């Protein structure tokens, strides 16, 4: 029988990954597909992160309330796409450390990835640490949104939407805690 814990990972990780792989094989991304796939993985990661952060507000909406049940799976899928994003970038550049230090927006994305990495590890092995660092995900996500904004040559509407959503969520959290 099919395990209920596997189903969310199929929806949030395997399905987009299969679509990207099919896109590569049918030539959807063109000749220089590696850079396009790199950006696709980054976009999927940030959108899953936004979905995870919005999930607590979906509890009141009947059709979307099911998303709040899979918050951890969405977060793990977001991390896995961020990992694929950074691995593809590491393989496509000669000197990753130089690139991170030279381009500030890459440093912002790397800071978000570092926090996501620590959250990923601590969510399985160190629950106390996870709950202490988990409030940092929203401000660090804003760094990821800035990374997304500056990584596009032309300002993208999607990048602005991601930044706007995360900025509003951060303002709401600050207002709530004040």
Image: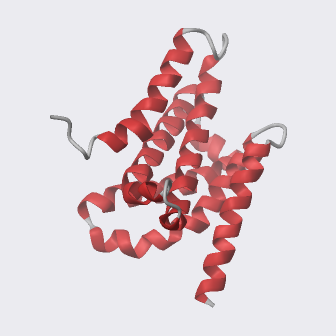
Residue at 15% in and 34% down: 1
Residue placed most toward the observer, 105 or 26:
26
Q: Position of residue 148 (x, y in %)?
A: 69, 47
Q: Position of residue 97 (x, y in %)?
A: 58, 43
Can residue 94 be seen?
Answer: no
Residue at 52% in and 10% down: 25
Quadrant where the C terminus is found in the figure:
bottom right
Q: Position of residue 106 (x, y in %)?
A: 65, 47
Q: Residue furthest bottom?
A: 178
Q: Residue furthest left?
A: 1
Numbered label tally = 0
Residue at 24% in and 45% down: 4
Q: Position of residue 94 (x, y in %)?
A: 59, 29
Residue at 69% in and 75% down: 171
Task: Examine the rendered structure and indicate whether residue 39 appears above or below residue 30.
Answer: below
Residue placed most toward the observer, 106 or 30:
30
Horizontally, residue 42 falls left or right of residue 22, namely: right
Can residue 133 be seen?
Answer: yes
Task: Examine the rendered structure and indicate whether residue 20 appears above or below residue 100.
Answer: above
Q: Residue furthest front?
A: 62
């Amino acid at each position: 029988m099919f395990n209920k814990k596997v189903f969310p990972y199929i929806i949030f990780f395997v399905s987009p990954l299969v679509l990207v792989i099919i896109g590569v094989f049918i030539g959807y991304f063109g000749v220089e597909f590696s850079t396009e796939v790199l950006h696709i993985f980054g976009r999927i990661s940030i959108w899953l992160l936004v979905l995870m952060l919005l999930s607590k507000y979906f509890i009141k909406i009947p059709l979307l309330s099911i998303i709040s049940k899979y918050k951890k799976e969405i977060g793990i899928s977001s991390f896995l796409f961020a990992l694929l994003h950074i691995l593809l970038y590491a393989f496509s550049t000669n000197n990753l450390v130089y690139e991170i230090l030279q381009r500030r927006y890459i440093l912002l994305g790397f800071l978000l990835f570092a926090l996501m990495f620590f959250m990923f590890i601590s969510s399985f092995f160190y629950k106390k640490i996870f709950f202490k660092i988990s409030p940092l995900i929203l401000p660090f996500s804003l760094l990821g949104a800035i990374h997304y904004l500056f990584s596009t040559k032309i300002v993208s509407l999607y990048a602005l939407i991601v930044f706007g959503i995360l900025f509003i969520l951060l303002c709401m959290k600050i207002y709530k805690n004040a």
